[in-house]
Image (cartoon, rainbow, N blue to C red):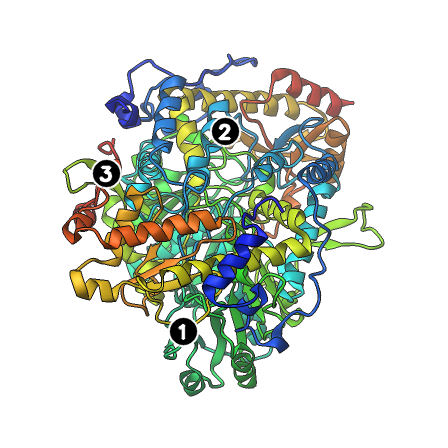
Amino acid sequence: MPYLFNTSEQQQEMLQAIGVDSTEDLFSNIPQELRLDRPLNVPPALTEMELQAHVSKLAADNVGPGSRVCMLGGGAYDHFIPAAVDEIARRGEFYTAYTPYQAEASQGSLQTFFEFQSLICQLTGMDVSNASLYEGGTCVSEAAFMAMRVTNRHDRVVLLGSLHPEYRQVVETYLKHLNCEVVVVPCVNGSVDPADVDAAMNDQTACLVIQHPNFFGTLEEAEQLTEIAHKYGALSVVSYDPISLGILKRPGDYGADIAIAEGQSLGTPLQFGGPYLGLFSCSEKFVRRMPGRLIGQTVDRNGKRCYVLNLQAREQHIRRDKATSNICSNQGLIAIRAAVYLALLGKQGIREVAELCCQKAHYAAEQLAQIEGLQLPFPERAFFKEFVLSCSEGADYLLRKARQAGFDLGPELSRFEWTDGSGADQTGVLVAITEQRTREEIDRLVTALKA
Amino acid sequence: MRNQLATESLFALSQPGRRGAELPEADVPVKPLNELLPTAALAIEPTGLPEVTEPDIIRHFVNLSTLNMCVDTHFYPLGSCTMKYNPKRHERLASLPGIVDLHPYQNPSDLQGMLALLYETQEMLAEISGLPAVSLQPAAGAQGEFTALLTAKAYFEDRGEKRTKVLFPNSAHGTNPASAAIAGFDCVQLASSKAGLVDLEDLKANLDDQTAVFMVTNPNTLGLFEKDIKQIADMVHEVGGLVYIDGANMNAILGYTRPGDFGGDMMHYNVHKTFTGPHGAGGPGSGPIAVRDFLSDFLPGPVIKRNENAGENGDQYTLENPPKSIGRVRTFYGNIGIVVRGYCYLRTLGAKGLKAVSENAVLNANYLKAILKDVLPVPNGDLCMHEFVASASKIKAENGVTAMDIAKRLLDFGFHAPTVYFPLVVPEAIMVEPTETESKETLDAFAETIRKILQEDPEYLHQAPHSTAISRPDEVVAARHPILQCCEPQ
């Protein structure tokens, strides 16, 4: 075992210092009848060389991007990751450090998270960002909890039917036992009619959750929906695509109260769905009701500028069953990735990535729609980098045909549970085009699907 | 000596026109944006992100990183957090093509290697816990607690019972009551006995037909094994309740005893503590849960199933939702990148290695406790498990030196501070967890340093640390007038 250091002589010396005869004696507080009387039944130990061969074999049993083109979307995207992101995130000083409880020993992490918060505020136009939550889906639930505390309305939240169905399921799981009604406004033709939202709202509603661009890739009337939420005294919660804010109005620009997102697009690899990054920001007046970790600037005893974990009293550390959340960890390392990514791209770069996604996605949609048997079911809806493509022969046929040509499209809408009919009768699949996709790839897909 | 510029904020380094990344020209016909998207939806001006070059960014973050203490550079005896060595092979293997680049919505037929790895992890976690059904979905330990409590709730509802109470000892992690409250339960806090264990009388007094779950960490947060755990579990089961084991301290008992064997019905693992996912300056963690067979139908889905006679597409491994599932607790399947690191660790150690981990963790903790006991007495227990909680209250009474003073001064000698002021049941608590990946030499040097510190001038200690980049930040001002970003909102 390469990770244990004490020699058997040292172990003997240590046992002597403790005053026992054997290591076994150290476990004497575990009653004999509760002991496992056999070795654990787990696979035999492997050396590093054997492990590498074994995991490489498992990796090779997956058909990865080496041989396929990824046009999969639905909340996880194949964006480019500059080398500098990995370089910083792989530094042991970051990834083997812990939560910065001792500020003097952790100024590196603290300043980085403080800058992460600043970058997210600039990206979203919001006043305050926390230092990250688990991932995009749980952010919606945390936003709903926070809205309930802020509005003191605990019985009702309204979601757009165009919200990621898995986000909706997470909210339903989280709120099921709090007697809070989750109302889903049906999504018709790829986005939600503001009049339907207005009809679903009332003065007992804690918040309205909007996804913009929505799960189908199309834009919602986010600004108008925010006004509707406010009309009923509810908070407007906007789930955004961070890359889209390179060209779209920011949630802070149109008065959103809470802005949340899945931050995977900002420099984190797909890695089969996690760990990802929950982005959570809000307006200043709600800061003390915000969940998660916050880093604040202050001065030390010599008057020097420095950073600390701030406003901890509202967290589970102190208030326990009155805590604002049960969250203990955050996604520190993924937040560092996002900070490096946003710094590298900067003002111009984020705009260019967003434009490339948008231009290429529109080119792809236009080309694909010309193929017989394929349609864009929501032709009037503006979309950003992702769109629904439907096929007269069915989604399976479309996916299979693309697969055979080396392209992964999807997910298919039919794989999700739709409580409001939004995608239930769809034969559609999502197609996501990032800046990494080339015209050559798109044209090759078009040729393959034509055949 | 580092120049000032190196740690200025990114925003202070920003100069208009600089950039750290360049993008290729569009290779498709480009249309004006306002033809593609409604003008009203478009940004009026660019975001306020800084404009800096790649070398600026590298120098900035590399310099910041050197202001951290971490396991790769320092002894980090942070009790309850389990800061042990993070094997480098994990980082390499988790980054392999075919692991790091899989999309969660790829076709399961193309994912058989990944699903095999995850299935095998489920099996190993089941065996180590003695609890047969596992869900890898929870993103962290606290989410695992919450998930298990919802699982229990669904189980009771399925039986037509509506139980309202969750009990926990007063030494519990703060997440326990917070998770119970968020899951919609009433929280009942129990006293601890003089020995620092669950007070059986108080437990008995609070158990009734409204008890849903008793949550307990074992070994507990004082680093002591709850020796009456079987009796405790029997008492809870007698009133129809379930026992939840907070797995935060599993690294003390691997291969020695199992929650399933000592009466636990549900537990979570902290993959980042027990199975060395790196802590990442605060996360990501990963908090799989393991439960008894009668709870398996309620687990959050999807879980990975193995089909002996291969499934519909001939796939051996499939993703399935348990029939009475509580639903989803997060998007996709879990913090898979961290689970992969846990898998690598388990496969490196095997049964013998896992047992050796606990043996050495417990040996190191007891040794350090023994060589410090004359200066830092431990109020509870003769033998500890993987960690111990000493008290500085005698020192404080004598010369005013606090647990925090000692913690801060340790930084000057190149040791990360232990956890202080937790658990709340010990005054001036200093919670030390050396872990199994430290040597006797390091422990001796640490003990020696504590002795040296305790002889220093109390005034000097109140001002410590003296050698770090900053010293004793003003947290009161930070909380009263929060400054939470480096620039004014746009």
- Point out residue B394 in the picture as x, y percentages from the top left corner: 24, 67
Q: In the rendered image, which residue does mark 3 sit on? A: B470
| Relative vertical location of residue B218 with respect to residue A269 in this rendering, above or below | below
From the viewer's side, name the closer residue of B387 and A300: B387
Q: Which corner quadrant of the image does residue B306 belong to?
A: bottom right
Q: For mark 1, does the 10 Å Cα neighbourhood hold few (<14), some (14 to 19), or many (20 or more) residues? A: many
Name the residue furthest right. Answer: B309
Callout 2 touching callout 3 (CB < 8 Å): no
Tag 1 subunit: B
3D distance between C-alphas at marks 1 and 3: 37 Å
- Point out residue B3 in the picture as x, y percentages from the top left corner: 26, 22
Q: In the rendered image, which residue does mark 1 sit on? A: B169
Tag 3 subunit: B
Q: Residue at x 50, y 30 (%)?
A: A383
| Relative vertical location of residue B328 with respect to residue B246 in this rendering, above or below | above
Tag 2 subunit: A
Q: Is residue B400 left or right of residue A438?
A: left
Q: Is residue A296 left or right of residue A353?
A: left
Callout 1 touching callout 3 (CB < 8 Å): no
From the viewer's side, name the closer residue of B421 and A2: A2
| Relative vertical location of residue B347 with respect to residue B128 in this rendering, above or below | above
From the viewer's side, name the closer residue of B274 and A328: B274
**Quadrant of image for the C terminus of chain B:** top left
Label 1: element kind: strand
